[in-house]
Image (spheres, rainbow, N blue to C red):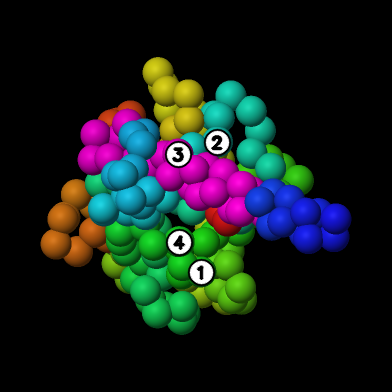
Amino acid sequence: MNRIIKFMMLVGIVTSITSCSSVQQAARTVNNSGILNTPTSSGTAKKMGSLGTGVNNAQKITMGTYYIINVGNQKALTNPKKEKFTKLRLEDFDGSDLQKWEVIQSKNGTIQLKQFDTPNWYVYFSNSKWLSVNSADPESFTLKPAAGTANRFHFVTSTYGGKVLIWDGDPNYNGTQTAVLENNKFDQWELVPAR
């Protein structure tokens, strides 16, 4: 009788593991057009890795850790060295800590972005158009829903005349900068809860 019970428990465990694998294969990924698609038959995306769905822009964003994905090139905001004064880039999604950002809310409704597991905050590089991280003077943003979308945002700067965070359009470098809002794929972002 004990062997039958042990066998049934083993069957239950194997079934649970198999169903978890199926859930992972059903995870969705973002393609170059900005549309969420199912991954390849192996259960992983060829280009970006598995992502969830960006949070709904009709609701207030909760404090937490997110991946910040640009709609224009479908790459994640990344600090390649996890150091201060590093020019931020947009790189293929890999789910690493270098791509995780803590969203911190202020009482006035703005947010600030802190790189996960570091003392570094998202700042504007004063001597160039590139954006970087530093341990002081974080940039404040207002999240504005992108018109005609359900899960895309504009990061509107508080200190630079209402300019928004954009991908600079250079596919060789994939940097970020600020510019006037145009409501196009270069200035639209998705916030995907980090795992």
Instruction: Say which element carries label 1.
Output: helix
Say which amino acid is labelled 3. Answer: Ala
Residue matched to label 4 = 95
The foreground one among 160 and 169 is 169
The answer to whether residue 191 is visible is no
Marks 4 and 1 sit apart, C-alpha to C-alpha, by 7 Å
Asked whether the residues under the numbered discs 3 and 2 touch, taking CB atoms below 8 Å apart as contact, a structural biologist would say no
Q: Secondary structure at mark 3?
A: loop
Label 4 amino acid? Gly
Q: CA distance from mark 3 to mark 1?
A: 24 Å
For label 1, the residue is: 97
Q: Is residue 35 above or below residue 80?
A: above
Mark sitting earlier along the chain (4/3) = 3
Name the image quarter holding the N terminus.
bottom right
- Mark 2 — residue? 55
Query: From what the image shows, is residue 126 above or below residue 27?
Result: below
Q: Residue at x 58, y 67 (%)?
A: 116
Question: Left or right: 60 with respect to 39?
Answer: right
Residue 26 is labelled as 3
Q: Residue at x 26, y 53 (%)?
A: 46
**Which callout, 4 or 3, points to the residue nearer the camera?**
3
Residue farthest to the front, as pictured: 1
